[in-house]
Image: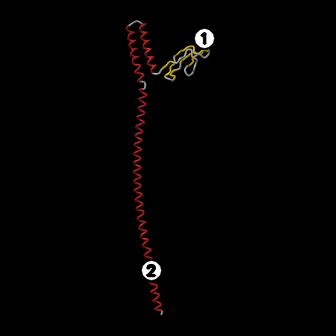
Amino acid sequence: MTNGHQKDNESAQEPVYEKEQTTDTQVEEPKNDAAESVSESPDSEENACVKELEELREQVKEHQERYLRVQADFDNFRRRSRLEKEDFAKYASIKLIESLLPVIDNFDRALQSSKDTKDFDALAKGIEMVYRQLDQVLTQEGLSPIEAVGEPFNPEFHQAIMQVESEDHEEGIIVEEVQKGYMLKDKVIRPSMVKVSR
């Protein structure tokens, strides 16, 4: 009985042993699959990261090249603007100079004729003509004399060099102009030097 009972026990134990073995094998297989998928996953992620990094590097390179082109264009623009400003400042008076050349020519003629003749009246008339011509050129450019004598003193336009007693004028009126003042359009170039009544 013990033998029969022992056989029953053995046969009962064998399938349990097989089941355990089967279970162990089945459990091990998924572990292997998981390990394989884990080992594949970092490679594909790494490849994706490398690809993304390369794309970003390309973008950075493009942006740097674009920035350098824009910077070069801006530097060229600044250089051109500076040169144009310098040229403008250098030659701003060319129109005025061209207008003054005939005046200079007439002064030359007047000086030449004064050597050839002793007619001072003719010389004075020639100089007066040249003066009128010069005055006309300067007026066309916007130069105008500042009114002074008989006007109330205004420190924006006049510079008082002395005060004088005057029975003919009220206090603060300009009685004499020592040096003429000028304006260019609406800007005072030189104030009139004047004597003012007190």
Q: Secondary structure at mark 1?
A: loop
Classify the position of the C terminus by image quarter.
Answer: top right
Q: Is residue 113 above or below residue 2?
A: above
Q: Secondary structure at mark 2?
A: helix
Give neighbour class at mark 2: few <14, some 14-19, many 20+ (Cα, 10 Å): few
Mark 2 to mark 1: distance in Å? 141 Å
**Which image quadrant is residue 103 in?**
top left
**Which image quadrant is residue 69 in?**
top left
Circle 1 is placed at which residue position? 168
Image coords of residue 78 (percent x, y): 42, 36
Image coords of residue 83 (percent x, y): 41, 32
Residue at point 43%, 9% (across, down): 125
Q: What amino acid does circle 1 point to? A: Asp
Give neighbour class at mark 1: few <14, some 14-19, many 20+ (Cα, 10 Å): few
Q: Is residue 162 above or below residue 2?
A: above
Is 162 on the left or on the right of 90, as rendered?
right
Instruction: Tally the numbered discs.
Output: 2
Is 149 on the left or on the right of 92, as rendered?
right
Q: What amino acid does circle 2 point to? A: Lys
Going from N to C along the chain, the mark reached first, 2 or 1, is: 2
Residue at point 42%, 69% (across, down): 33
Image coords of residue 45 (percent x, y): 42, 60
Instruction: Specify the farthest residue to the front.
Output: 140
Q: Tag on residue 19?
A: 2
Q: Is residue 91 above or below residue 107?
A: below
Q: Tag on residue 63?
A: none
Image coords of residue 126 (percent x, y): 41, 11
